[in-house]
Image (cartoon, rainbow, N blue to C red):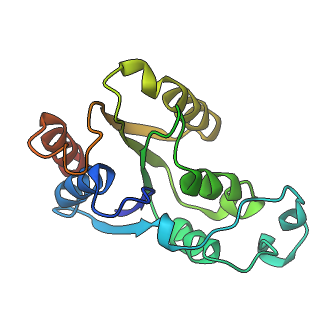
Amino acid sequence: MKILILTASPRKGGNTDILAKAFADGAMENNNVETVDVCDCKINPCVGCNSCFTRENNRCFQNDGMQSIYEKAADADMLVVASPVYFYGISAQLKAVIDRFHTPARKNFKIKKVALLLTAGSSKQSVFDAIVRQYELIVDYFKFEDKGRILVGGVNDKGAINGREELNQAYLLGKSI
């Protein structure tokens, strides 16, 4: 299976990246895995013009890093998103990607399975609630198979996730795919 992992933390090598790597390490045992840091892709937000509905191949008029993500998503069987929690939501960089998936071109994607990896500085479990609910709605709408979620709170400082059981859980989740 081809697995596309989209990481979305502006803090390079931080807790989100470490969590995504643990998943990838497990998944690479039986799958082709590619990780893309969307923070490096220079993706503009959707402007809501809907020109992608009428343009050839449903291409967005914006010529930015999203074109590469469209190509990778079209070839992936599974999508994994990994984000830090920023004020009860995903990072702005990941939000731009998700919004830009509002295109008829997504009907050509092979993605059938998804997983969610989140990190948060707060140790309150409710910090994940809004993101998890949105994820559930997307899974339901597109009839995706939810392969799992790893939610790690209380990891504010860079590297605070090291030694946490959730890293092993992420590895095992990846290996189970």
**Residue 161 picture quarter:** top left
How many tags in the picture? 0
- Residue drawn at point x = 61 percent, y = 50 percent: 95
68 lies left or right of 146: right
Quadrant of the image occupied by residue 163: top left
Residue 136: where, in percent of width, then height? Answer: 53, 30
Task: Identify whether 89 is placed above or below 60.
Answer: above
> Image point 45% across, 39% down: which residue?
85
Left or right: 74 in relation to 6: right
Relative to the observer, which residue lies in front, 106 or 117?
117
Q: Is residue 123 above or below residue 165?
A: above
Residue positioned 78% across, 71% down in the render: 60
Vertical placement of 156 versus 54: above or below? Answer: above
Residue at 61% x, 58% y: name it: 97
Q: Nearer the viewer, residue 34 or 159?
A: 159
Q: Quadrant of residue 169?
A: top left
The x, y position of residue 6, in whole percent, is 44, 59
93 in relation to 134, above or below: below
Residue sitting farthest toward the front = 157
User: Residue 116: percent from the left, percent from the top?
Assistant: 40, 42
The one of 119 and 69 positioned closer to us in this rendering: 119
Residue 114 placement, left or right of 177: right
Residue 120 placed where, x, y %?
A: 36, 36
Q: Quadrant of the N terminus?
A: bottom left
